[in-house]
Amino acid sequence: MKSLAVRVLSDFAVDGIEPQAFGSKKARLALHLLAVAGGQAVSSGVLIDALWAGAPPARPEDQLAVLMSRLRSVLGRDRIEHRDRGYLLHCDWLDVTELAMLTQEVESRREAGHVMGAVAAPGRALADSRRGPCAAARRVGAAEAR
């Protein structure tokens, strides 16, 4: 299965997939909502409210299932999981998660008295995240090797 990297902090994007591949704006919005949840399931009710803004179609759960099917056809069948009345996105890299890890690294360095390391870490990590998940993984791997 191909790696799935998702960016939500700036313009929403899935690395290697053009936005048009997802079809409708509703499908892209549904994917964005799932990504922002950061590995947590999003209830069908929340998705329906966000996608149809108070004016849902006659059978909103069916329409939502169609959107999820379209997303699965682009991302891969196992990337979107249906759970108890909700959906969950499985991705390999999410920029929000990278930011959380960076914040934790800065705090750990600062608390350990490594002020210069705390100052340098955000710039390196931000540069890596702009280059994508492979650069970020190399940085984490190098840090673990030390």
Image (cartoon, rainbow, N blue to C red):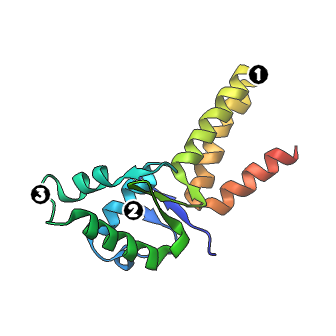
Choose mark 3 or mark 2, whichever is in front. 3
Query: In terms of sequence position, does the residue under pointer 2 or pointer 1 come before the other?
Result: 2
Indicate the position of residue 91 as horizontal and vertical percent values: 56, 61
* 25 lies above or below 74: above
Q: Which mark is residue 31?
A: 2
Find the distance from the CA under tag 2 to the CA under tag 1.
Answer: 39 Å
Query: In terms of sequence position, does the residue under pointer 3 or pointer 2 come before the other?
Result: 2
Relative side of 81 to 146, left or right: left
Marks 3 and 2 in Cβ contact (< 8 Å): no
At label 3, the amino acid type is Ala
Q: Which mark is residue 112?
A: 1
Secondary structure of the residue carrying numbered label 1:
loop
- Observer-nearest of 72 and 61: 61
Question: Can you tell which quarter of the image residue 129 is in?
Answer: bottom right
Relative side of 137 to 100, left or right: right
- Observer-nearest of 114 and 67: 67
